[in-house]
Amino acid sequence: MKTMMIARGAYAKSNVCGCRPPRPTSVAFVTVESLFLVGCGGAPSITIAGAYFPAWLLCALIAVLVAVVVRGLMVATGLSNHIPYQLAVCSSIGVIVALVVWQLWVVR
């Protein structure tokens, strides 16, 4: 099979390493992409007991706790009997709380 490819000229068309040079569009794309990555300053973190935790993790934990409390309040007041899709309601409340905490605490 190798002799057949040589006869057809497949090896004559390729360069020494067997790969083609990068296209100008690929080089331009990588260059522009790297310019946008220069300004990354790292993830916001919070120090708790000497260890660094990502801020989004603490916001998510607060949101889950608030959603559990809201679910408990809904059951205690009897509101859970009247609200359909309780999982979606509690999840939405958790997401809203997480985004509000993130905006007030981390973004500044």
Image (cartoon, rainbow, N blue to C red):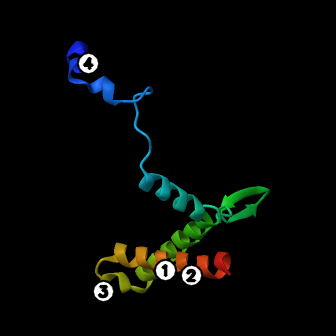
Query: Which quadrant would the N terminus be assigned to in this image?
Result: top left
Q: Assign a secondary structure to mark 4.
A: helix
The residue sitting at 41% across, 79% down in the picture is 75
Work out whether mark 4 precedes mark 3 in sequence or the reverse, and give the earlier one.
4
Residue 28 seen in this snapshot: yes
Residue situated in front as seen by the camera: 74 or 37: 37
Tell me how far mark 2 sits from mark 1, CA to CA: 6 Å
Q: Are marks 2 and 1 in contact (CB under 8 Å)?
A: yes
Lower sequence index among marks 3 and 2: 3
Label 4 Cα neighbours within 10 Å, binned few <14 / some 14-19 / many ≥20? few
Query: Distance from label 4 to label 2 (Cα)?
Result: 66 Å
Residue type (three-letter) at the residue carrying disc 3? His
Contact between labelled residues 2 and 3, with CB atoms less than 8 Å apart: no
State the residue position of label 3: 82
On screen, residue 51 versus residue 3, left or right, reads right
What separation in Å lies between label 1 and label 4 (alpha carbons)? 65 Å
Q: Amino acid at mark 1?
A: Ile
| Secondary structure of the residue carrying numbered label 1 | helix
Q: CA distance from mark 3 to mark 1?
A: 22 Å
**Numbered tag placed on residue 6 in the rendering:** 4
Q: Judge depth for marks 3 and 2 and give the one in front.
A: 2
Q: Residue 35 location, x and y as percent?
A: 59, 63
Task: Locate the C terminus by quadrant.
Answer: bottom right
Q: Which callout, 4 or 2, points at the residue further toward the start of the chain?
A: 4
> Residue 96, labelled with which disc?
1
| Label placed on residue 100 | 2
The 10 Å Cα crowd at callout 2, few under 14, some 14 to 19, many 20 or more, is some
Task: Tell me the SS state at disc 2.
Answer: helix
Q: Residue at x 20, y 23 (%)?
A: 8
**Amino acid type of disc 2?**
Val
Q: SS at mark 3?
A: loop
Whether the residues at callouts 4 and 2 have beta carbons within 8 Å, the answer is no
